[in-house]
Image (cartoon, rainbow, N blue to C red):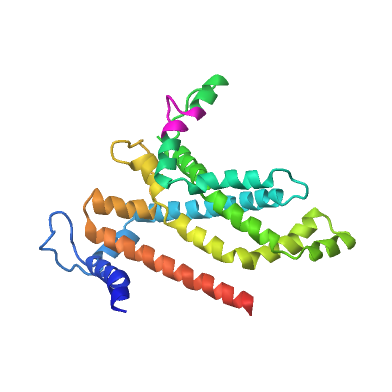
Amino acid sequence: MILIAMIVLFPILYTGYISFTNMNLYHWTDYSLIGAQNYTRALLKVDSGFLAALGTTILWTAVNMALDMAIAYVLAVALNTKGLKARRIYKTLLIFPWAMPAYVSILVWRVGMYNTEFGLLNKLLVAFGFDKVDFLSRNVPAFISCMVLNLWMSLPYMILMMDGALQSIDQSMYESAVLDGANLWQKNRYITIPSLRKIMAPAVIMTTFITFKQFDIIYLLTMQKGSVTGSTLQTIITYAHQNAFVSNNYGLSAAVSMIIFIIIILFSFWTNRIQKEEKV
């Protein structure tokens, strides 16, 4: 219990305490309590940037999870097609993006794919007669570029989980559906998807958490020191990082961190409640 308190509880409580102070670069040792001013600034001050970052984070999570689930489902079903040759080779190849260190993957994509002069995508665009595109200099292209990379890194895990879930479905249900005259759409709608929901719920919830608090991709592609691209894309995680390590406003950063913590806790309670209701 003492070890848990030191590792888990103390950082949370200390962060909560700092969030009520004016600790920053100029008040490192002589900081004082300022009440809920940091929370008020983050939640109620429109130009603070937090609300925009929160909106971007929600959009980022929703779009990534929708595409992740849809693409993974289609590919997992394709991998389970009867008579498919070299199925094991395809599954092995799928593991590579997930198994590679995230830092290496992100830097390879930044230089090898998105670079304006040497990137593969721009070389293809020029070869087909189009102008070069600076994928990371503006918010919308940067958002899409980060999303594509995130899907490339997260899809293998979701596909493999969904592939295993598909193989656990009782095949006799499909045989009965065929005898009843069900087509492909009806088999997917009434057998496959309902069967996958309970099995895939833990993997989907975990991936949602990971996507919500994604930091590496957005930071390393658009905000890394020495490689700033011009995009002002911010999620609440990069916003907290910027306030802590760029603006050195530790009080505000701690407040944002506590808000993120509360959001994740509330989401956890909500998902647990839904799962309990479905079991009943």
Q: What are the residue bounds of the magenta stretch?
A: 111-121
Nearest to the observer: residue 161 or residue 216: 161
Total labels drawn: 0
Residue located 55% across and 66% down the image: 202
Task: Classify residue 45 as left or right of residue 113.
Answer: left
Residue located 58% across and 73% down the image: 275
Nearest to the observer: residue 276 or residue 256: 276
Residue located 43% across and 27% down the image: 116
Position of the N terminus, as image quadrant, is bottom left
| Residue 120 picture location, percent across and down | 50, 28
Residue 195 vertical position relative to residue 101 in the rendered view, above or below: below
Position of the C terminus, as image quadrant, is bottom right
Nearest to the observer: residue 31 or residue 77: 77
One can see residue 280 in this view: yes
One can see residue 49 in this view: no
| Residue 226 picture location, percent across and down | 28, 36
| Residue 229 picture location, percent across and down | 36, 35
| Residue 163 picture location, percent across and down | 65, 55
Magenta span dominant secondary structure: loop
Residue located 37% across and 66% down the image: 261
Question: Which quadrant of the structure image shows residue 232?
Answer: top left
193 drawn magenta: no
Task: Classify residue 11 as left or right of residue 156.
Answer: left
Residue 133 vertical position relative to residue 96 in the rendered view, above or below: above
Task: Classify residue 102 as left or right of residue 88.
Answer: left
Nearest to the observer: residue 229 or residue 72: 72
119 drawn magenta: yes
